[in-house]
Amino acid sequence: MPKITLDGKTLEVPAGTTVLEAAQAAGVYIPRYCYHPALSVSGNCRMCLVEVEKSPKLLTACSTQCAEGMVVSTASDKVKAARRDVLEFLLINHPLDCPICDQAGECGLQDYYMEYSRAQSRFSQEDKVLRQKRRALGPHLMLDNERCILCTRCVRFCSEVTKTAELEVMERADHSFIDLKAGKSLDNDYSLNIADLCPVGAWTSRDFRFKARVWFLKKAPTVCLGCATGCLAEAHHNEGEVFRLMPRPNAETNTWLCDRGRMTYKALRAGDRLTKGFIKNGLIDLEPALREAATRIDEAKGAAAVLGSPWLSVEDNAALALLAAAMKTEHFCFDFKFETGIKDGILINKDPSPNAAGAALVKAGKGGLGMEEFRARLNSGAIKLVVAEARAAALLKEELKASGARLIAFATNRADIPAGAYATLPYASYFEVPGTFINYQGLKRAVEPAVAAPEGVKPLWEVLNKLAAYSGASLRLDSAADAMKGMA
Ligand code: SF4
Ligand code: SF4
Ligand code: FES
């Protein structure tokens, strides 16, 4: 455990700790471009230079390990002058793009210039080296080589994280630029992380470009519900619209997000978003749709069934269990078993649903049939009507078709509705209402609403409340949390 002195403070750090890490742990921020905690150290940008006693030159804090007795200064005049010089060097050929650059507001060049430089450029605009601008590389990204500071974070991400190695630094010295290797395309499952990693506006997201200025965006903590990994994320939104999902790095689950997970927010404003009920093939208002669904449930009496869903929150599954009790049916099931585990060695889970573990929790509290028994009852004709969330119902597509049982489904988007559904009732997405999910590691994931649901679209527990009321029963729910009463 070497002891060092950093800006006059004595610190004891584990062997192998770099000066940048030691400073960070002590609350001292050292500026950096090429350093990223999840990538190898390349030490090329020189932004993290610090003064170390007895060293003839300034040293890069990201690649210098702490040694016993080291005396480090992170804010001496020499260090401040070096930062100004590094910034002047990096900005020599940088285009005057800030007013039209999507990175403005979260750009490492802008921020550090304001904090550490504010010097006038000694180079005229005419002398700048020009580079290729705005190239779409891959389905999600745009590259502007002129804005690049050659920190190589993007290159290292593709070689070290996705191991797809699509990118390379081409040419030498001031001819250098980032490009695709011959024959490669930038379409790995995690490509959008490159836009986050790039400290400047060289890589930008084609989805987010020119949609919103970052200083207008508000941030709501959320969870990606794209699979059982349950990556922690942040929904960036403004005036009722979500503009992007960004990772919320954490030690337990994720530093990154996969591209498919990042795009899950698009369903919110998709053209097929359901805001009304759907009976057979026609749209009708929610209340008559609920009345019609309740009439069919009453008609089926003891042959009506309720299926939980691994795509719904724990609370909404518990509300479905209350509906089953109100319907006085013994045909209900919260038993979903998928193979789990990270299938690509990074994040994407074998289980495509976000809450099989949460549904199992409801099964433990409320009982119900195993999935095999539920399927058998459908096949035998003992079940004549199923009330279910659309994606869970799609798991029993064959059985529903063969048995001719009626399906009363709940869906946020038309694309999820299984063919042949008798009625579909809309409900609010988990970007619009709170909920609890349990990921494949058994970790509790709470989502907070980022935006309001479209007019007339209710949380699922409220839809179930009304459905029960049309059948003359009451679930006594005033909130999602009420459904959890009486459950451990
Ligand atoms: S494109 Fe961005 S991440 Fe890649 S080397 Fe240039 S500045 Fe770094
Ligand atoms: S790995 Fe799963 S939870 Fe994580 S971002 Fe991708 S889809 Fe979402
Ligand atoms: S952050 Fe240390 S050299 Fe780039």
Image: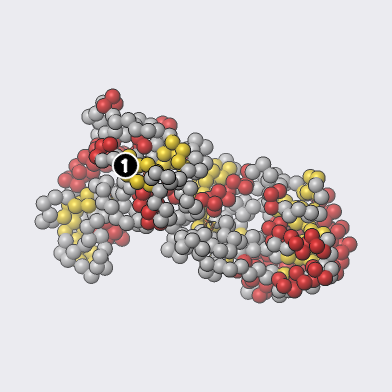
Q: Which x, y percent locates residue 360?
A: 64, 71
Examine the rendered structure and indicate whether residue 177 appears above or below residue 472: above
Extreme front residue here? 183
The residue positioned 41% from the left and 39% from the top of the image is: 143
Q: Which quadrant of the figure has residue 314?
A: bottom right
Q: Residues within 10 Å of mark 1 (few under 14, many from 20)?
A: few
Of 274 and 41, which appears nearest the observer?
41
Quarter that holds the C terminus: bottom right
Q: Is residue 104 visible?
A: no
Q: Is residue 442 left or right of residue 80?
A: right
The residue positioned 31% from the left and 60% from the top of the image is: 25
Q: Which x, y percent locates residue 308?
A: 70, 65
The residue positioned 57% from the left and 60% from the top of the image is: 227
Q: Is residue 177 left or right of residue 251?
A: left
The residue positioned 46% from the left and 60% from the top of the image is: 346
Label 1 sits on residue: 170
Q: Which x, y percent locates residue 90?
A: 27, 39
Q: Which quadrant of the figure has residue 379?
A: bottom right
Q: Which x, y percent locates residue 281?
A: 80, 47
Question: Callout 1: helix, strand or loop?
Answer: strand
Q: In the rendered picture of this protein, how many numbered marks are placed on residues?
A: 1
Q: Is residue 98 left or right of residue 338?
A: left
